[in-house]
Amino acid sequence: MSARLPPELTVGFEEIDRQHRRLIDLMDAAAAAARAGDLAGARGAVAALGDELVTHFSSEEGFMAETLYPDRGRHKAAHDLFLQDFAQLGGELEAGLSDLAVHWLTVRVPEWVKFHIGVNDVPLGQYLTARHFRPEQPRSPAAKPRPS
Ligand SMILES: [Fe+2]
């Protein structure tokens, strides 16, 4: 896992920064597999990245809802649009490691994530930090109680 994030990608709210480090590691792995022409590796990395994105977005959306973050509607809309795009990438990869799929994995996805962190997540991190917000528990599917 990356030891630290560059300053422009540091939100300053530890739970979000921790999730971003994991996302960036998965994104790097997907890009490396794409560059190496490793279709199975790229598919595996994209599946892991997709799971992590869903968990991460729902975590941020939970924080925004709990704190009544004023920009939460627009922020969630950005997440939803990106997940639609990301689903198209999954479809593209089913056909193989096309030039388009490689471009998405090496350029489009990393650019979107970095842009989104800078434009949407940094202000959210500042808002949460200013309110001394503390997440009650990690928001991952594994943390949910199991039905008996
Ligand atoms: Fe976000």
Image (cartoon, rainbow, N blue to C red):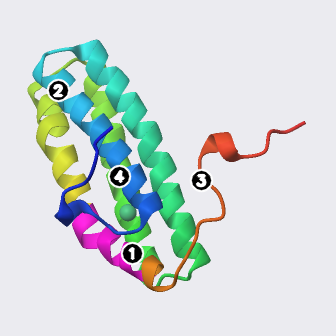
Residue placed under numbered mark 1 in the picture: 124
> Is 51 on the left or on the right of 66, as rendered?
left
Secondary element at image label 4: helix
Mark with earlier residue (1, 3):
1
Please provide percent x and percent y for residue 111.
16, 52
- Whichever of callouts 1 and 4 sits on the residue coming sooner in the sequence is 4
Q: What span is in magenta?
A: 117-127
Amino acid beneath label 3: Arg
Going by the numbered disc 4, the residue's amino acid type is: His
Instruction: Give the residue number, with chain letter if any, for mark 4.
Output: 20
For the question of whether residue 49 can be seen, the reply is: yes
> Alpha carbon of mark 3 to alpha carbon of mark 2: how far?
28 Å
**Pointer 2 residue:** 32
Q: Nearer the viewer, residue 88 or 144?
A: 144
Residue at x 51% of width, y 48% of height = 55
Residue 41 location, x and y as percent? 29, 17
**Rendering coords of residue 135 (x, y %):** 59, 66
The yes-or-no answer for disc 1 within 8 Å of ligand 1 is: yes
Which callout, 2 or 4, points at the residue further toward the start of the chain?
Answer: 4
Q: Is residue 124 depicted above or below 87 in this figure?
A: below
Judge the density around disc 4: few (<14), some (14-19), many (≥20) Cα neighbours within 10 Å. Answer: many
Residue receiving disc 3 = 139
Task: Determine if residue 84 is in view.
Answer: no
Q: Quadrant of the N terminus?
A: top left
* Mark seen at residue 85: none
Q: How many residues crowd around disc 2 within 10 Å: few (fewer than 14), some, or many (20 or more)?
A: some
